[in-house]
Amino acid sequence: MNAQLALGLGLTALGLVGYVVGIETAYPGRSFAVTAVMVGVTLAAIGRSAGPEESP
Protein backbone atom coordinates (compact mmCIF):
# COMPACT_ATOMS: atom_id res chain seq x y z
CA MET A 1 0.00 0.00 0.00
CA ASN A 2 1.45 3.37 -0.94
CA ALA A 3 1.70 6.34 1.38
CA GLN A 4 -0.98 8.48 -0.27
CA LEU A 5 -3.58 5.73 -0.05
CA ALA A 6 -2.77 5.03 3.60
CA LEU A 7 -2.81 8.71 4.50
CA GLY A 8 -6.08 9.21 2.65
CA LEU A 9 -7.80 6.33 4.38
CA GLY A 10 -6.54 7.44 7.78
CA LEU A 11 -7.58 11.04 7.25
CA THR A 12 -11.02 9.95 6.03
CA ALA A 13 -11.52 7.78 9.10
CA LEU A 14 -10.36 10.54 11.43
CA GLY A 15 -12.64 13.05 9.70
CA LEU A 16 -15.63 10.73 9.99
CA VAL A 17 -15.00 10.25 13.70
CA GLY A 18 -14.70 14.02 14.13
CA TYR A 19 -17.93 14.54 12.22
CA VAL A 20 -19.85 12.05 14.36
CA VAL A 21 -18.50 13.59 17.55
CA GLY A 22 -19.41 17.03 16.17
CA ILE A 23 -23.03 15.96 15.73
CA GLU A 24 -23.30 15.16 19.43
CA THR A 25 -21.09 17.91 20.88
CA ALA A 26 -20.33 21.35 19.54
CA TYR A 27 -16.60 22.02 19.63
CA PRO A 28 -14.40 24.67 18.01
CA GLY A 29 -13.08 23.63 14.64
CA ARG A 30 -15.59 20.87 13.97
CA SER A 31 -16.03 22.12 10.41
CA PHE A 32 -12.51 20.85 9.72
CA ALA A 33 -13.89 17.31 10.03
CA VAL A 34 -15.71 17.72 6.71
CA THR A 35 -12.56 19.15 5.15
CA ALA A 36 -10.57 16.17 6.45
CA VAL A 37 -13.04 13.78 4.84
CA MET A 38 -12.83 15.58 1.49
CA VAL A 39 -9.03 15.70 1.51
CA GLY A 40 -8.82 12.09 2.68
CA VAL A 41 -11.08 10.84 -0.12
CA THR A 42 -9.04 12.81 -2.65
CA LEU A 43 -5.74 11.39 -1.37
CA ALA A 44 -7.17 7.87 -1.36
CA ALA A 45 -8.33 8.28 -4.96
CA ILE A 46 -4.92 9.58 -6.02
CA GLY A 47 -3.22 6.74 -4.18
CA ARG A 48 -5.37 4.11 -5.92
CA SER A 49 -4.88 5.48 -9.42
CA ALA A 50 -2.11 4.19 -11.62
CA GLY A 51 0.37 6.86 -12.55
CA PRO A 52 1.77 7.18 -16.07
CA GLU A 53 4.76 5.02 -15.16
CA GLU A 54 2.48 2.22 -13.90
CA SER A 55 0.02 2.09 -16.81
CA PRO A 56 0.19 -0.95 -19.13
Image: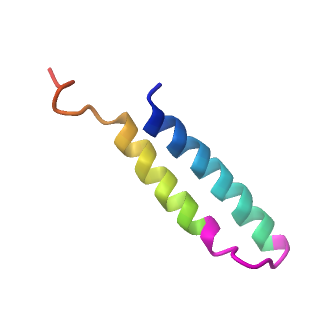
The residue at 66%/57% (across/down) is 16
Q: Position of residue 11 (x, y in %)?
A: 59, 50
SS majority, magenta: loop
Above/below status of 39 relative to 10: below
* Residue 13 appears left or right of 38: right
Image quadrant in which you'd find residue 26: bottom right
Tell me the colour scheme of the image: rainbow
How many marks the image carries: the answer is 0
* Residue 43 appears left or right of 55: right
Is residue 28 in the magenta section? yes
Is residue 15 in the magenta section? no
Q: Position of residue 15 (x, y in %)?
A: 64, 58
Above/below status of 19 relative to 4: below
Image quadrant in which you'd find residue 50: top left
- Magenta stretch, residue numbers: 24-33
Q: Position of residue 3 (x, y in %)?
A: 47, 33
The residue at 14%/20% (across/down) is 56
* Residue 27 appears left or right of 29: right
Residue farthest to the top, as pictured: 56
Residue farthest to the right, as pictured: 25
The residue at 51%/45% (across/down) is 8
Above/below status of 55 relative to 21: above
Q: Position of residue 1 (x, y in %)?
A: 47, 25
